[in-house]
Image (tube, grey):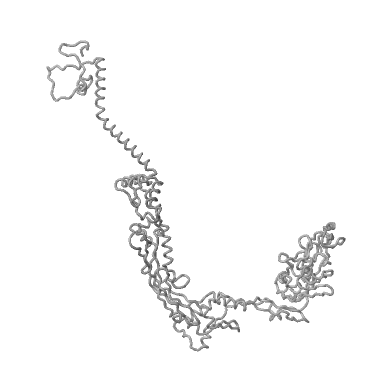
Amino acid sequence: MSDPSKSGSEFQDFKPLPARRKNAASAKSVPGAPAPRTNSVPLSNTRVPPPPELTPEARIDLRRAQRRAQRRTMPRVGASVLVFLIALVLFGGAFAGYQIYLHDRAAPGVRVLGEEIGGMTRTQADAHIREKLGDPNVLLSRFGGEQIVLRDASNVYRAWPWELGFRSDLKPALDVAFQIGHRSDFFLSWMEQGRALVLGADVNASDAFDEALAKQYVSVLAAQIDRPARDASFRLEGMTLIETPAQAGRRLDGDETFQRIKKFAARPAGEIALPIQDLAPHAVDATKAQTQINAFLQAPLVLTFEDRAWAIDQAALAQWLTLQPVSNQNGSPNQNGSPNQNGSPNQGGSLTYQVALNDAAVRAKIEALAREINQAPRDARFHFDNGALTPIVMSQEGRALNIDATAQAIAAKFQQATASSRASGNAAPSDSSIDALRANTVALAVTVTKPEIDARDKDKFGITGLVSSGTSQFRGSIPNRIQNIKTAQQSFDGVVIAPGATFSFVKYLSEIVEANGYADAYVIFGDRTVLGPGGGVCQVSTTMFRAAFFAGFPITERWEHAYRVGYYEPPKGLDAAVFVPSADVKFVNDTPNYILIESVIDVKNLRLTFNFYGTKPNGREVKMSEPVVSNVVPHPPTKYIDDPTLPRGTTKQIDFAVDGEDVTLYREIYQNGQLVMREKFFSHYDPWQAIFLRGTK
């Protein structure tokens, strides 16, 4: 390369190119730029000048020229974009402002019954519509100035427009109008706004009435028009069916009536024809029922048990019968068995009446018989007189009429009598009244229970003599206590206990109530001795316990008293308390024969005895050891209680002092002189305080 500071005579000095030729010049003259391709081959003798070297000032001028060229080219591309963006911003702003404007206003172009409300707020629209259409006379004039006629053939019903739901305030129509262009779907709202603005949107009268009010009117109208179809019905009078004729029904189609009112609102002209459905009753046939009645009532029904019989005549039997309609094909009687009265259109079919038994009536009769037949089993009772048993209470078998089984037997007899066809080989009912009566007989289903102690079996009891006795004294008893002892001991007189059976004192004791002869006497209640019903019954249970004790019978339950009671001593520790139902006296008859209990009360000498009769086990002998007293606890000091009902200076003792102690005794059972059992009987008695009432009156 030649020295840039030098210039040959054949080369011209470099000058800046004009700006408009920038692109071409830069492609040709910029140092380092690739030379353009050409198809010509350079001549070997042709001299190509080297690219000019740019001075620093030239380079600066070149860059300035390039920037000026770029600034002239940019407005050509960005001007259109800028115009578009400005237009878009202006449109968006206008659209947003339009939406803000419409936020609480009706869309332009919206009308209600021809009245323009576009651009109005709801308050303004309400006032405008009220002024133009709010007068009821204006509303009435839209429907010809008269009541609207609803016609059912010759029956005419008249209603004011507002009775059918057309409202003078047109609130429903305004609600619809203000929904146009104000949807939750923005695209749909914009479409509605544009359509209303260009084509208009008129809310008609069908949107200007209260549907709930219209439906209410239809329901009131239906109540006046509807009449359910009534099938022919029958009732039984004696043995004859009496018919009540059928009646056709009709029903207003409520849904269709509502739609017709709604259509009338859009084009109020003429009358509204009411859609009425005719309801036809079922065809009814009672021939089968009459045949069944004749068959079942041809003779009385006879109910038998053992040698007893109860005849139910035809008039009473007729009260047991009920008539039931049976549908054929599509006929549908009511669930209660009565004919069709539900107002539904008859879908065809017919009804056939048949006879059925009224189960409630049958059971009522059986239950009445049960009260006459039923009885609890009762054991026989005896006295032992001169080696023989004399019945004092006869035994009685138990009887229980099975109501379910008897009702089923009567139902089977009814089915047999009224069957439409009979099995091969079965004879038809005889015309003879005697044969018909025999054929109409039902044996009652009675469960018989034999008593445990049957008087007819007394010779098998093996009761031959005295087995043991128990005795107690009741000296010092008040009259009411003596009365209770007499009443209670009667509950056990003549009782017979089977071999191996367990005797329960409470089981046989009569209920302790005044009606059974009991009176108030002193009883132990908690930590006090008080007057109460049945005081003295423990005298009887103690005496019974002693008889069983000396018979050697196993004692399975026995309770001592809370404190020592003088009536039951001596000896100590041989008493037995009862308290229904928690405390009882029980023992087991461990002999192979029956045991008879016989009570003997000596009111003069104030003594009670129970004798056990039976067959005494060979060689059995019972002895009692002397009671052993331990753990003696002195009684508390005497207690006085002021009583305003007693005169001052007088006292009345209501509880008696007794020391507490433990008593132990033994029962020894010998067999042929040999000790075979020694049983311990332990009793714990609490110390008891003497209590006096002191008069303060």
- Residue 687, position as x, y percentages in the image: 82, 59
- Could you tell me which quadrant the C terminus lies in? bottom right
Residue found at x 12% / y 18%: 44
Residue found at x 46% / y 73%: 338
Residue found at x 50% / y 89%: 432
Q: How many numbered discs, if any?
A: 0
Name the quadrant containing residue 77: top left
Q: Nearer the viewer, residue 461 or 287?
A: 287
- Residue 22, position as x, y percentages in the image: 21, 22
User: With respect to residue 401, does 642 lie above or below?
Assistant: above
Q: Nearer the viewer, residue 433 or 83?
A: 83
User: With respect to residue 498, does 37 lie above or below?
Assistant: above
User: With respect to residue 200, does 21 lie above or below?
Assistant: above
- On screen, residue 267 versus residue 388, left or right, reads left
User: Can I make out residue 590 in this image?
Assistant: no
Name the quadrant containing residue 502: bottom right
Residue found at x 38% / y 72%: 348
Q: Nearer the viewer, residue 38 or 273?
A: 273
Name the quadrant containing residue 94: top left
- Residue 509, position as x, y percentages in the image: 73, 71
User: Can I make out residue 13 in this image?
Assistant: yes
- Could you tell me which quadrant the N terminus lies in? top left
- Residue 551, position as x, y percentages in the image: 77, 71
Q: Nearer the viewer, residue 351 or 182?
A: 182
